[in-house]
Amino acid sequence: MGALTVTFEDYGIAAPAEAGETILEVATRAGVGIATYCGGHGICCQCQVVVTAGQVQPKHEAHWQQWPTPDGKGIRVLACQSVVTEDITVKVPIGSRAEDFVVHQMAPLKANLVDLSRFEPLSPLAQQFVLDLPKPTLEDSVTDMDRLRRELLHRETKLEPITIDLPVLRELPQALRENDFQVAVAVSDIGLARKISAIRPPAAADSSLGLAIDVGTSTVAVQLVDLDNGQVIGRAIRRNGQIAYGEDVISRIVWTQKSPEQLQNMHRAIIDTLNQLFSYLYNEYNATPDEVIAASVAGNATMINFLLRIDASPIRRSPHTPPATEIPVFTAEQLGLNIHPQGAVCVCHPAVSGFVGGDITAGVVATGMHEAEELALLVDVGTNGEIVAGNKDWLICASCSAGPAFEGVGVEAAMPATAGAVTNFDYNRDRDAVDYQTIGNQPPRGIAGSGLVEMIASLVEAEVIDRTGNINADFPSGRLQRSDDELGFVLFNADETAIGEPIIIYQHDIENLLRSKAAVLAAINVLLGKLALAPADIEHVYLAGAFGAGLNVDKAVAIGLLPDIARERIEVVGDTALAGAYLTLMSRQAREQARATVKAMTYLDLSSDTDFMDEFIASNFIPHTDLTRFPSVST
Amino acid sequence: MFVIGERINGMFTDVKKAIQAQDPAPIQQLARDQVAAGANALDINVGPASSDKLGAMRWLVEITKEVVDVPLCIDTTNAEVMKAGLEAAEGNAIINSTTGEEERMEKIVPLATEYDCPLIGLTIDAEGVPRDANGRMEVAMRIVQACMEQGIAMTDLYIDAVILPVNALQQVPQEVLNTLRMCKALSDPPPQTVIGLSNVSQGALHRELINRIYLVMALANGLDAAIMDPLDTELMDAAITAEVLLNRSVYCDDFLKAYRK
Amino acid sequence: MPLTIPTERWTAHVQTATIGATEAEGGTRTSTVTIGGEQTLPFLHFEGETPNRPVIAIEVLDEQPSGWPEPLSRHYEDVWGDPVAWAQKAVEEFGADLICLRLVSANPEGSDASADECAETIQSVLNAVGVPLIIWGCGNDDKDNEIMPFCSQAAAGERCVLGSATQDNYKTICASALADNQMIISESPLDINIQKQVNILVTDMGMDLGDIILYQVTGGLGYGVEYAYSILERTRLAALDGDKMLQMPMLSIVGSEAWRVKEAWQPEEEAPEWGPLEKRGIIWEAATATLFLHAGTDILVMRHPEAVTHVRNHIDEMMSGQPV
């Protein structure tokens, strides 16, 4: 292809370019979505990008425009008017992104994770009561508030104490009288009390909706739920808009310390991401923000603190203590979330530490491992890579900063699990051909998390790569490529893909993936070692995170992502954080269990552990330098 | 003022979905709603919704024609798609648009004569969008000449001075206002003027407010037509009020209602 | 070198209205009157079509008037006790295109005639003449609201014009017009904004644009006609510019206003410099009418037969399109 390279920093994509092409043209071909409404004529000015290295030439000298950058580095230009004549590096600001930040539908969660029958009776985070209040008279002249309270307690004595916020109190007299004292009252469970959050005409009670939210570092997932019966109405996922400010929590914390505005920007990025997800769900399912009266949020400590616009920098510095791990219940309008303004927003899952957050607590509650006899291991392969081991008697957790390679960030061929993503992959050496499956059975656009696992397993088996992850330069196939100084392997030819370009895995991609999986395996091994347990002692492994249900767990063990444990004990569970958020949205019991679980969990800090470093280096091998640990994996 | 409704554009999610699903209902509802809100013509733009732009344009024009009678503004940069749209509209159309570039004018201006319909001319030349009002006027003059040569009446030509987003290029809205005024001195009778209003607030916050204020400013500087959202009631109210203040429409107490009758 | 006359191109034109219904149309009129449809300012035939000529309605009162100057009264003394005879004379002898019947007898401060009596008068006049009818109340809102439904009903099917709807009192007359398929006069106190507002009110009630005739209350020559002219002209310009709420044909009341002025009745002895009394009123009426004609009026309501003749000749000339 082209002799030049445009590196899109935020995407980890080095796109080939011809001299004379515009940045927009290069980006479009490389699958980097840059917004444009005028077809690249320099009219809508939405395709602004920052050139951080190298020079660009103006497409039209006479009408060249450039702007200053927020941090003073590089120049800000229109992608459609900037011509590439040498290698350049480009950052694409969030406001200029198109396709990448599209909201996608999400597959349902596993039934056993969201089984509400464990928590009967239901007691959702917010409920609506239709009340027919006796009107005030000379004989019965209690205050409006007491009248309401009296009637609510009539319905359910356990609602005591009942409180109300000023904005709702202001509306109370009018709302009662306008509706002839027949009203639908929404009541939120704020832990220490019940709070009246809305007083509306009785028809409002026809629809009580709630949201279960997983604020992941890379991916945010939301479920719209009917609070009356727990039915899930719809689900959606989207990349976390904070990615532009850093891929992982540390780099994001560093970003927010540049200036006070940056914390505001970081906060805005997640609020906008969430509101966009909500809008999608409202449109798809004909709901309105006013119907949503509660939201349960799961996320790690840094994500939660940014959501609430709290300075999370103490997490970065030793001894890594977050500002808070148990969060009081807020109202939506305090955060700027587009649900009912007085809707209760509950971070129902406290974090254990700065590094093992509420999302893991949520995962524990969802899997039920905290109530089970069996010894279980929860492995969440997200950006942070947390693991929890234990059962109803004890729980220990650790985190290993795995990196988002399996979620599709930093690996050119990777993509989120949406239409066209390869989920199963097998390279047949004899035929020099690939057998694969994609989501939606469409031509491949990229590789999803499970596809990446299977790809590595397959390539090592076919000896395309060796056990250290190096691509074999002498491998006898036309798929072998050399680009600059790097080897790559063509997984799909241009005519096989949906994007008109081949899908290639490069050496540095494999290294990224290996590093991620090594961190996870090392963390598990060190944790088990400290407990004097062997992998064979683990009776149930819950593999959560960036993998769909279709993942072949054999391959996960084969590459050394997980220890060599009997395959039937390994269960791929998907987004356990979201499942936990759903359970705590619907049940007070689940909320209490979440709090109790945190108190029961002990955090093991691996960052200062010498064993961990040794294990990590040994794990950077497929499956591990010590093959005796993987007896069932054929070599 | 001449209102061209902008909503039937494939860059809007609802329109995009309808085009992809070949579902006429949402498009037809938008057509009806915009005309009911006071649109004198409707812009039809396939946007990024389909790779078969020609087929999609034809389809959009046909289903819109079924429910409204107003002229359809065929919005595309592709000459073939333009022709397809004009054919489908059976002449009850407006050509949106040509630029001031020679090759484009050669292809597009004759279509105005062939299909006997008005034409929008963007003040863009081979160098792109001119920096200031003078630059725009130079291109406008060329477009006026090309039209006169083809015998197109100035009342059938709309000069679009290409408004750019205020948050990116804050000096441009003023230059466009100057251009609008200067256009009236181009010839006698002078060509009409039009702007794509929503672009002034592209990427900014408080879009409706920015659109509303700028439309009024432009009307005061002689704007004749705008591609805008007639479903934005406050925007329409502002335009109607501006017309009364500029003595282009007779005041009566119910002047907001009068316009809509 | 030939001079090119710059022509104006108007994008809209005046509404067309047809007053009166023949037997085929469900009425009993032997003639109908179609007005409006102008595509440009009055009589500029080189610029646009004037498809319908302006018409003259002669005023008939339903009871004997008093104080009319002799040059006028001498033509009506033999009939002015009998509206039927009066109407017949106006049509057969003086060539009225329409009759404008004023129900002055209904005035509560005068004869306070009942609704039934008025209805009967209308019926008789309709039976007596074949031209279309304008039926005007007595000017007292409450009494007019009482009689109008009956009057309208009496003329049902005849496509008459009922007068008048004002900003403060329009509902009853509209209801009657809608019920009996009549037209209405939309009245304004020489204010273009109020004229437009009244039209909004009546169209809100369901009146069709084609069933409305505009009426500005104007004085005679010497009594603010320049202003009146400018209002009528502005209305016509707005119509041609596309303002639907001002696009209807216009009516001016000329006779009663012109004969009211001093110049029409002051005896020669008291004002010798004004010339013969014989001529003064006629000239005054003819001049006033001509003025409003050139402002855009489509229906002139007049009195004196000679003034009518002068104005009709003038209309012939202006409509011929030939230089005079």
Image (tube, coloured by chain):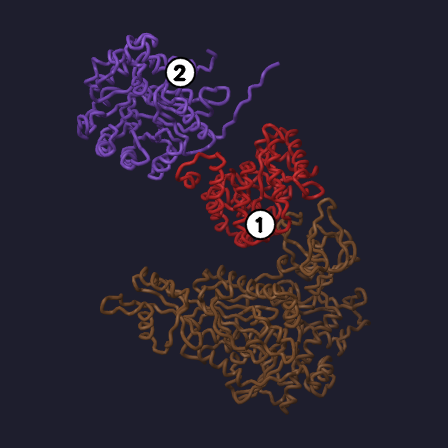
Q: Which chain is red?
A: B
Dot 1 lies on which element? helix
Q: Which chain is purple?
A: C
Mark 1: which amino acid?
Ser
Q: Is residue C287 above or below residue B145?
A: above
| Front of the two marks 1 and 2 | 1
Q: Is residue A325 above or below residue A420?
A: below
Which one is in front, B93 or A151?
Answer: A151
Q: Is residue A81 above or below residue A355?
A: above
Residue C87 image position (x, y, % from top left): 25, 18
Q: Residue at x 41, y 41 (%)?
A: B257
Q: In screen coordinates, is C199 left or right of A322?
A: left
Answer whether labels 1 and 2 touch (C-beta < 8 Å): no
Residue C126 location, quadrant: top left
Q: Chain of mark 2?
A: C
Residue C218 image position (x, y, % from top left): 35, 24
Which one is in front, A157 or A570?
Answer: A157
Q: In screen coordinates, is A531 left or right of A111?
A: right
Q: Which chain is brown?
A: A
Q: Which residue is mark 1?
A: B201
Residue A57 appears in the picture as rendered: yes
Q: In screen coordinates, is A460 left or right of B228?
A: right
Q: In screen coordinates, is C229 left or right of B180?
A: left
Query: Quadrant where the C terminus of chain A lies?
Result: bottom right
Q: Chain of mark 1?
A: B
Which one is in front, C265 or A156?
Answer: C265
Dot 2 lies on which element? helix
Residue A33 location, quadrant: bottom right
> How far is the residue under mark 1 from the one under mark 2?
57 Å
Residue B14 image position (x, y, % from top left): 52, 54
The label shown at residue C315 is 2
Mark 2: which amino acid?
Ile
